[in-house]
Image: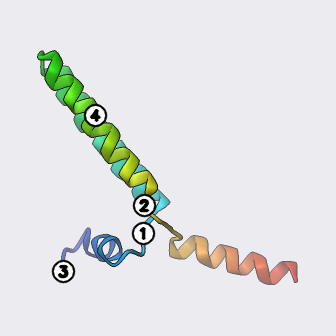
Amino acid sequence: MNNKYFGSALQDYYSGKGLTLSLKIKAILFLTLGIAFSIYKIQNLHVRIALVIVWLAVAIHIILLKTKKNKEAAAYYNLNSKVKK
């Protein structure tokens, strides 16, 4: 994965390591905005229902993916665990 912006996230996704919580939130946010805009523009009720079903399925898929700790959070938790000892 040589993509400058998404390479590491795609690598983690394909290798089964999961996604960070912030990446999951951003993905669901962009998905919601795109689907909402499409629902707003399209008048056909059946297509709108299909879009809602697609949104729901993709959002559930993203939520159920393994959540990976980002490096800053991991460093923070490691620091706190050492302090408590």
The Cα atoms of the two marked residues, 3 and 2, are separated by 22 Å
Please give the residue where the numbered disc 1 appears in the rendered image: 18
- CB under 8 Å between discs 3 and 4: no
**Amino acid bearing label 4:** Ile
User: Judging from the image, what secondary structure is the residue with disc 4 in?
Assistant: helix
**Amino acid bearing label 1:** Gly
Q: Estimate the x, y position of residue 47 in percent, counting from the top left.
A: 14, 25
The Cα atoms of the two marked residues, 4 and 1, are separated by 24 Å
- CB under 8 Å between discs 4 and 1: no
Please give the residue where the numbered disc 2 appears in the rendered image: 65
Give me the disc on residue 5.
Answer: none
Task: Please tell me how crowded label 1 is: few (under 14), some (14-19), or many (20+) other residues with Cα within 10 Å.
Answer: many
Task: Please tell me how crowded label 4 is: few (under 14), some (14-19), or many (20+) other residues with Cα within 10 Å.
Answer: few
- CB under 8 Å between discs 3 and 2: no
- The answer to whether 26 appears left or right of 53 in the picture is right
Q: Earlier in the sequence, mark 4 or mark 1?
A: 1
Please give the residue where the numbered disc 3 appears in the rendered image: 2
User: Judging from the image, what secondary structure is the residue with disc 3 in?
Assistant: loop
**Closer to the eye: label 3 or 4:** 4
Q: Earlier in the sequence, mark 4 or mark 2?
A: 4
- CB under 8 Å between discs 1 and 2: yes
- The answer to whether 63 appears left or right of 36 in the picture is right
At horizontal 17% and vertical 29% (from top left) the residue drawn is 38
At horizontal 42% and vertical 69% (from top left) the residue drawn is 18
The Cα atoms of the two marked residues, 3 and 4, are separated by 32 Å
User: Judging from the image, what secondary structure is the residue with disc 2 in?
Assistant: loop
Task: Please tell me how crowded label 2 is: few (under 14), some (14-19), or many (20+) other residues with Cα within 10 Å.
Answer: some
